Amino acid sequence: MARKKVEEEMQGMDPQAFIEAVKNITSEKGISEDVVFEAMELALTTAYKKNFDSKTNVRVDINRETGEIKVFSYLVVVDEIDEGDTEIDEEGNEVDVPPTINIDAQILLEEAKEIVPDIMVGETIEKEVTPKDFGRVATGTAKQVVMQKIREAEKNSIIEEFADKQDEMMVGLLAMEDARNYYVDLGRTRGILPKSEMIPGEVVKMGSSIKVYITKVEAGTKGPLILLSRKHYGFVKRLFEREIPELANGDITLYSVAREAGLRSKVAVFSDNERIDPIGACIGEKGSRIGSILKELNGEKVDLVGYSDEIETFIANALSPAKNVIVNITDPVKKEALAIVDDENLSLAIGKKGSNVKLATKLTHYKIEVKTLKQINEEANQE
């Protein structure tokens, strides 16, 4: 709305209306007034050169209080006219080197002294050359450039606003969808939530609120590109931080998360406070806290794992729901471990299609091999 108002009020080029329009859009969009004024001055300079004088030695000045527009031609005083030069490039070709100051903008010192007797080299002589109908002629060009600069400034402002939100969770509204993506309204812009980044099996409704994890924020060709996910392991991490106060205040630490979206996540937690049970705190009274998390995860199972700085204990815990697990570190450098279980717990430790041991490997950062004593003995006899 503010951008449209700027366009409308620029049609008449009324100075006070223009100043008011600038203030409206800078306030609403959170951008600098200088950005708009500088864009306008650039636009008017271009319009003047195109319609009145093709010389390059002009500048446009807008009074930031009254909106009055003036055009000035200027000459820079020099002791010798610089017409540029030529030089040889690395490939041996002769190339032109432009003058430091445009030729149109140069005036010899002796000529300048006829105008301003005490002027010196390097100083500037200015003359106002504002045409009477300049506003009418310049409006079209000025409007286009100003709108472009406003869009650029708005885009940069949004990128700055969201730059520190990467790897964070936000709540947005499902605004629209196409064959591959959902588009989530995040306030000043929309994020892209690929359907491949949804939790498998979940159904959403347009217009409803949705929690999303921001995986990437960058400047795109058409505006800020904000990629979202509900499948990322960071989504589970941020959910826990939102639901468990002890994680937010530091009484409990979330060590790591491993996830196979839609099936199972493993979350390792610990506390330096002996009076706090980190797993119990995450579960909450009658499962209230973990229940809220599971509801958001569309029924995905979550294993709460007690972290331990004794890696054997941590690996044994990570292989939950398997019990009575004995762990031997076979190669501490390569981070490899052997987990020994009984026949009853073998399938639990490995999981369906190896999912449980894969998640435990991700959680602990150790490559885990699961075997029973019987399997170990059989392999030893074969040798």
Image: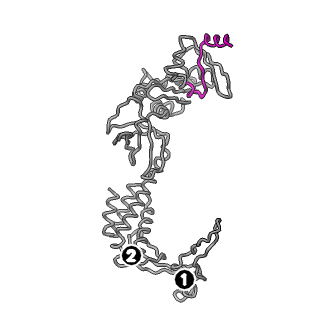
Q: Residue at x 53, y 11 (%)?
A: 344
Amino acid tagged 1: Ile
- Quote the CA–CA distance across marks 2 and 1: 24 Å
Where on the picture, by quarter, is residue 44? Answer: bottom left
Is 382 contained in the magenta span? yes
Query: Which residue lies at the image location 50% right of the left edge and 45% below the top edge?
Result: 164
| Residue range (magenta) | 360-383
Dot 1 alpha-carbon crowd within 10 angstroms: few under 14, some 14 to 19, many 20 or more: many
SS label for mark 1: strand
Label number found at residue 254: none
Place of residue 199 in the rendered image (x, y in percent of width and height, measured from the top left): 42, 31
Q: Is residue 82 magenta?
A: no
Circle 2: element type: helix
Provide the residue designation for mark 1.
107
Q: Is residue 273 above or below residue 55?
A: above
The residue at which mark 2 appears reads as 51
Direction from residue 170 to residue 349 in the image, left or right: right
